[in-house]
Image: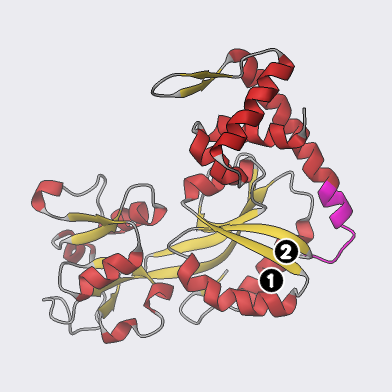
Amino acid sequence: MTLRELRYLVALADLGHFGRAAQACHVSQPTLSTQLRKLEESLGVTLFERTSRRLHVTPAGEQIVAKARRMLAEADAIVALAQSRMAPLTGPFDLGIIPTLGPYLLPWLLPPLERACPDLRLVVHEDLTEHLLERLRAHRIDAALLALPVENGDLNTLPLFDEPFFLALSPGHRLAGTKAAASQSDLRRERLLLLSEGHCFRDQALAVCGFEIPPDRDRGTDVRATGLETIRRMVAAGVGCTLLPAMALCGGGDRELDVRPLDAGACRRIGLAWRQSYPRAGDIERLAEVVRDHLPASVRAV
């Protein structure tokens, strides 16, 4: 039994899918399947019940997975203890970031981060909040930049900055041509383009607009996409309107969109999340310091 096999075991238990577990472990699916089969044979127990529809962890498997998590945490702590004698943000560091933040913050952050921490070997993982939290708890990333709050019973969080929302319209839209703040009643009467389910930004946009449930698809008010740039281009073409975070409007967006603030001053709070057991507190403090020192003017440090 090896630590690598235990990592495969925990990944499959968390993700419930051989393909996704193999991808998370950076191996092929046959490799992961073979190693887990060997683990089952060496232990003499069945760890997973495989059906045509789902993969279930067996009762014996649940107990073994729980112990495997503790063993992996201890192994990671040994590595971190050895690294703790080095300066903060030295060596490998896996950072998660949500898709509605990554394309806009990373160009501001990475150059100064490389200058401030030249010995850092950063790996960035862009994914939805739910998946990043899974990766954190499975020790597959060290920290994540995401929208707060999050369920943090076993995680620490640190607020970094507030990012305002803006109403984005095509120049020919009936609400365009004024810099007056848009009201919630304005938003509720418009065709709102939203990200697909699973994006925390979708839920935030619905809350700002006063929707307790997603808009009625039959009225054509709910057009979903997987990325903000898709929505931004659809709005510019006159398909509807949307809410965009301030950093998504940097870099010339005002030439193709008409932008209005919101009368409620709505914003999202971005922060860092990491495991309470993470032993290198200096890494988190240094990363937070660099982020706060190199924010664009469109957001407010907290």
Q: Which mark is residue 173?
A: none
Q: Quadrant of residue 271?
A: bottom right
**Quadrant into which the C terminus falls:** bottom right
Expressed as whole percent of the image width and height from the top left, the position of residue 233 reads: 26, 72
Task: Please give the name of the residue rendered at 66% of the width and 66% of the height, measured from the top-left corner.
Answer: 288
Q: Is residue 297 visible?
A: yes
**Quadrant into which the N terminus falls:** top right
| Residue type, mark 2 in image | Glu
Reading the image, the residue beneath label 2 is 285
Q: For mark 2, give the secondary structure.
A: helix
Contact between labelled residues 1 and 2, with CB atoms less than 8 Å apart: yes
Q: Is residue 179 magenta?
A: no
Q: Is residue 157 visible?
A: no
Position above or below: 159 against 23? below
Task: Please give the name of the residue rendered at 57% of the width and 16% of the height, measured from the top-left corner.
Answer: 58
- 266 left or right of 111? left
Q: Which residues are magenta?
A: 79-88
Position above or below: 267 against 225? below
Task: Please give the name of the residue rendered at 48% of the width and 45% of the height, measured from the top-left corner.
Answer: 130
Q: Which mark is residue 289?
A: 1
Seen from the viewer's position, the closer of residues 86 and 181 is 86
Task: Please give the name of the residue rendered at 72% of the width and 29% of the height, measured from the top-left corner.
Answer: 68
Position above or below: 208 against 261? above
| Residue type, mark 1 in image | Glu
Expressed as whole percent of the image width and height from the top left, the position of residue 231 reads: 27, 66
Mark 2 surroundings within 10 Å by alpha-carbon count, few (fewer than 14), some (14 through 19), many (20 or more)? some
